[in-house]
Amino acid sequence: METLYNKHRLLISQASLDIVREVMHTISWDRQLVAIRGSRGVGKTTLMRQYIKQRYGNNAGEALYCVMDSIYFTNHSLLDLAERFHTMGGKHLFLDEVHKYPTWSKEVKEIIDLWPDMKVTFTGSSLIQILNADADLSRRVLSYTMPGLSFREYLRFYKNIHLPAHTLQELLTDADGICDEVCRVCHPQPLFEEYLRVGYYPFYDGEEVEYYSRIENVVSFIIDQEMTQFCGVDSAYTRKLKAMLLYLADNIPYEVNIAKLSSYLELNKTTVLSYLSSMQRAELLHLLYTDNKSVTKMQKPDKIYVHNPNILCALSSQLNIGTLRECFVVNQLSTRHTVEYGKEQGDFKVDGKITFEVGGRDKSFEQIADLPHSYILADGIEHPIGKKLPLWIVGLLY
């Protein structure tokens, strides 16, 4: 156990507190059981280590941080560790990448049953099933989903520009005032164009080629490791999933033709639909439907988008600016709102009542002229023109 204590001290001491994401302050860390889920690369590990350093300092004692694929767990169980930690006065156990420990759900449940004064906080893949795991933790755990950086967070992380977050209603009713506030401290348009290329993941270091290589590695890990583990994907088909993702990156916004996609991948339609659903859970895709309330389990989506603009830039060999814009809008709005495909009536319907059309600065209201609560999100402008709003404004939601 001394080995774990030494690793704790080393890893926590290395955590920088220069920039801490605001999600840190929205998590109820003092609850007995807390889960932080999200896609690989969005910063879950960094957030956990930063919290430990702020709250407990570098030394192990009341708190202990463990990476769950540590060699320590090849001949020690998590339950044994928790018992020894509790005996030594430990209060808060932090388990990073809990999904890499096969029986995590059963043992975590037993830990909180045996020692109700001990708190357990864990991070895990967006694919882990808390509800359907071997031990149902759904009624005990407070779960958070951590997205990548918003445009607003990107400005803070990389440009030291601090702006407040706004609700969607605030963006729609006070767009002029909000845009004036942003434009007083920066010219958002060139920064937004940079964000679309390199701003979503918090590991950009100025080398675009290296950044895209890391994104490709993230995608490969999710498909090769996590989807085979959690989604029942046969490892023999992982190449087909990657081929599907590349195909979609070069053909979206993709009006879904499952027969054509099945033929391209040489898979049956049921398998393709199942894989698409799994890729959405893995935060590789967004599947949009015209009516979310009536969606059945194996219903084909009406439109498919790559999950975020940086994956799109990394994978697409023929990037289309219209696709990139729509990908950004779906990604940012989906963190807080329900997004549906608008079909003939605008590009997107949000929360069942707000219609957005997305385009360039010259985009007209022709398609949505008669719709109530309808707006254009236009690229290339920094101030609203009536109900035509700057595209980047939806990047201020979190």
Image: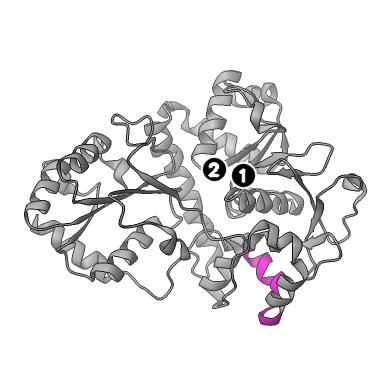
Does the stretch in magenta take in 172?
A: no
Q: How many marks?
A: 2
Quarter of image, res 295 = top right
Residue where numbered disc 2 is placed = 284
In the rendered structure, which amino acid carries the disc numbered 1? Val
The 10 Å Cα crowd at callout 1, few under 14, some 14 to 19, many 20 or more, is many
Residue where numbered disc 1 is placed = 306
Q: In the shown orientation, is residue 340 left or right of residue 60?
A: right
Q: Which segment is the magenta one? A: 184-195
Q: Residue 69: x percent and y percent?
A: 25, 46
Q: Residue 349: x percent and y percent?
A: 74, 43
The 10 Å Cα crowd at callout 2, few under 14, some 14 to 19, many 20 or more, is many
Q: Which mark is residue 99?
A: none
Residue appearing at x 64%, y 67% in the figure: 194
Q: Residue 369: x percent and y percent?
A: 91, 48
- Mark toward the start of the polypeptide (1 vs 2): 2
Query: Can residue 77 be seen from the camera position used here?
Result: no
Dot 1 and dot 2 residues touching (CB under 8 Å): yes
Residue appearing at x 35%, y 57% in the figure: 45
| Disc 2 secondary structure class | loop
Q: Nearer the viewer, residue 30 or 382?
A: 30
- The quadrant of the picture occupied by the C terminus is bottom right
Query: Can residue 104 be seen from the camera position used here?
Result: yes
As displayed, is residue 6 above or below residue 19? above
